[in-house]
Structures are given as structure tokens and as C-alpha cells.
Image (cartoon, helix red, strand yellow):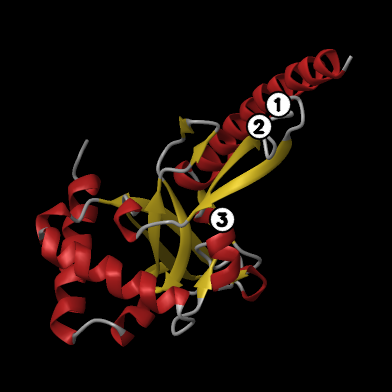
């Protein structure tokens, strides 16, 4: 009787995992398509936010590793404020604990605490901490202000994001930011020369896209 109940529980868990996986994948693709392809507009009709993933490989591994190490450490130590969205709205403040909850790897598993009673099992979760080397890339959010009087645009680098490829139920999802910081806060962890180098690389990425028609 115990064996039958255990098998039924395993079947139910299997179907629940499949259902959860489909829901996660569907939600992820909807979220990414809405955020990556569109232009977001806040309540202020004169402000627009656009986002793009930038390729900074030309800066070299040393520069990128140094950037990721300094920024991730500063975020998790609470020295730089992080946000869930690229508009950096106050209600999207992302605490180090919340970030850790999002990016640490969680694996549902079943253990048998008593080998002499194999039908007695306990469901548990194994947590593996996120590693800095798992940062896949970077995103930039631009803020564009429109002056309605003369119909002119003014743009600035508003936010900088660290990207990853989340894995759920052994399925790797598309690259996406897991947190954002104010671009100006990079000056707290980088030298003036490093900030200039980073801005130049981002600008070159932007001009490549703008001329790619």
C-alpha cells in the first residue's frame, strides 16, 4: 500500500514539474519580448526608456571580469543600490537578499533518510550559490527626454544591467538582466578612465546597430 501511494505521488510530482516548466518558459518569453523589443514609457509623456544587450567583448576579458567582479560585489555588499527594472523606480528597489533568492540555483530532490525504509522519503531543495563567472553579459538602458517646445531629443545612459541565462528544470532560458544599477553609480567602483572606456565601447555598439540597415 505504501509503495502504491509513493508511486502515485511520484507521478503527480512529475506532471506538476512539467506544468511548472511550461509556465516558466512561457512567462519568460513573454517577459523578454515585452522588455527587449519595445520602448517603455513612464507616466511622464516626455520620457522614454529603451533597452539593449551590449557586446563588450572588445574590451577584453580582464576589463570585463574586473567590471563584473567589482559591480556584483558592490551590489551584494549593499554599497550600490540595485533595481528590478531599468527605469530604476523607487518601488523596484532590489535588496541583496532578494537578488540572491532569484539567482541562486535551486534543485528539488527527494532523499531517503533511512536506507532500511526505502519507501520513507522527504522532499527537499538543494541550493547552489550563484557564481560571478555565470554572468553572461550586460544590458544598457537609455533614457530619452523630449522637449515639447522645440521637439528635440536628449539622451543619456540611464541604467546598466548584469545578464544571466536562468535555468529552470534543467532548461536554459534566453539571456536576460537579473538586476539594474544607475549608470552613474559605476563611477563609485571604476576609475574615470575605465568609465570613459566603457562609455566608448557602448557608444560604438549603438552606432553599429543604428547603421545596420
* Residue 174 in the figure: left or right of residue 100: left
> Upstream in the sequence, badge 3 or badge 2?
3
Quadrant of the image for the C terminus?
top left
Task: Kindly check if marks 1 and 2 are in contact, taking CB atoms under 8 A apart as contact.
Answer: yes
Residue denoted by label 1: 118
Q: Position of residue 125 (x, y in %)?
A: 63, 45
Give how far apart the Cα atoms at labels 1 and 2 are. Answer: 5 Å
**Name of the residue lying farthest toward the right:** 1
Residue denoted by label 2: 115
* Residue 133 in the figure: left or right of residue 170: left
Quarter of image, res 142: bottom left
Q: Position of residue 132 (x, y in %)?
A: 33, 60
* Residue 120 in the figure: left or right of residue 156: right
Quarter of image, res 119: top right
Give how far apart the Cα atoms at labels 1 and 3 are. Answer: 33 Å
Task: Kindly check if marks 1 and 3 are in contact, taking CB atoms under 8 A apart as contact.
Answer: no
Q: Is residue 186 visible?
A: yes
Give the crowd class for mark 3: few <14, some 14-19, many >=20 residues within 10 Å.
Answer: some
Amino acid at each position: 500500500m505504501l509503495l502504491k501511494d509513493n508511486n502515485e505521488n511520484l507521478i503527480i510530482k512529475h506532471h506538476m514539474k512539467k506544468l511548472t516548466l511550461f509556465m516558466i518558459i512561457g512567462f519568460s518569453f513573454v517577459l523578454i519580448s515585452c522588455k527587449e523589443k519595445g520602448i517603455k514609457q513612464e507616466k511622464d509623456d516626455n520620457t522614454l526608456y529603451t533597452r539593449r544587450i551590449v557586446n563588450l567583448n572588445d574590451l577584453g576579458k580582464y576589463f570585463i571580469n574586473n567590471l563584473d567582479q567589482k559591480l556584483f560585489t558592490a551590489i551584494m555588499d549593499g554599497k550600490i543600490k540595485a533595481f528590478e527594472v531599468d527605469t530604476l523606480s523607487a518601488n523596484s528597489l532590489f535588496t541583496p537578499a532578494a537578488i540572491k533568492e532569484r539567482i541562486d540555483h535551486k534543485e528539488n530532490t527527494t532523499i531517503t533518510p533511512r536506507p532500511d525504509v526505502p519507501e520513507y522519503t522527504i522532499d527537499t531543495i538543494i541550493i547552489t550559490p550563484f557564481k560571478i563567472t555565470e554572468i553572461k553579459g550586460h544590458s544598457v538602458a537609455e533614457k530619452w527626454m523630449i522637449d515639447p517646445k522645440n521637439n528635440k531629443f536628449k539622451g543619456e545612459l540611464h541604467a546598466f544591467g548584469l545578464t544571466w541565462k536562468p535555468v529552470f528544470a534543467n532548461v536554459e532560458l534566453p539571456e536576460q538582466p537579473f538586476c539594474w544599477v544607475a549608470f552613474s553609480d559605476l563611477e563609485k567602483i571604476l576609475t574615470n578612465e575605465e568609465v570613459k572606456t566603457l562609455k566608448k565601447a557602448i557608444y560604438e555598439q549603438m552606432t553599429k546597430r543604428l547603421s545596420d540597415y
